[in-house]
Image (spheres, helix red, strand yellow):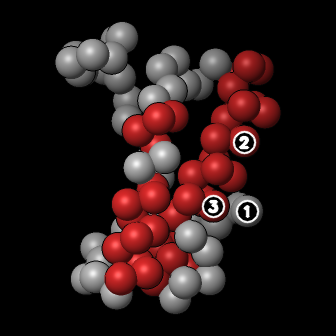
Amino acid sequence: MMKDATELAALVRTKQISPVEIVRDHLRRIDELNPKLNAIVTLVADKALEAKRAEAAVTAGDRLGPLHGVPFTVKDALDTAGVPT
């Protein structure tokens, strides 16, 4: 699914797609493209599947942030505890 972050967030808020589905789609795309691109050095997929908590918040009707449930990458230019830089 090729959508920008605001479109994905709107789909999450309206329960048309779940954060877990979005993360799974992103992980599948990373698996497909990253061997050629080498754009992602360290993938913390187990943390990404914390999308289940994001999904639970949607289901519970909790107040959601503007990009709730939308995965993102962080450039590893800064040292991060427990993650290779």
Instruction: Specify the quadrant that holds the N terminus.
Output: bottom right
| Residue at position x 45%, y 29% in the image | 44
Disc 1 packing (10 Å; few <14; some 14–19; many ≥20): few
- Image position of 75 (left or right of 32): left
Q: Which residue is at the front of the view, 33 or 53?
A: 53
In the image, residue 37 sits, relative to residue 14, either above or below, namely: above
Could you tell me residue 9's position as x and y percent? 47, 73
Disc 2 packing (10 Å; few <14; some 14–19; many ≥20): few
In the image, residue 13 sits, relative to residue 1, either above or below, namely: below
**Residue 1: which numbered mark, if any?**
1
Q: Earlier in the sequence, mark 2 or mark 3?
A: 3
- Image position of 16 (left or right of 59): right
Q: Which residue is mark 2?
A: 29
Give residue 53's quadrant in the image: bottom left
Residue 25 visible in the snapshot: yes
Q: Are marks 1 and 2 in contact (CB under 8 Å)?
A: no
Q: Earlier in the sequence, mark 1 or mark 2?
A: 1
| Secondary structure at numbered mark 3 | helix
Amino acid, disc 2:
Arg
Could you tell me residue 11's position as x and y percent? 56, 80
**Residue 43: which numbered mark, if any?**
none
Q: CA distance from mark 1 to mark 2?
A: 10 Å
Q: CA distance from mark 2 to mark 3?
A: 12 Å
Q: Which residue is mark 3?
A: 21
Q: Are marks 1 and 3 in contact (CB under 8 Å)?
A: no
Give residue 20's quadrant in the image: bottom right
Residue 6 visible in the snapshot: no
| Residue at position x 57%, y 52% in the image | 23
Amino acid, disc 3:
Glu
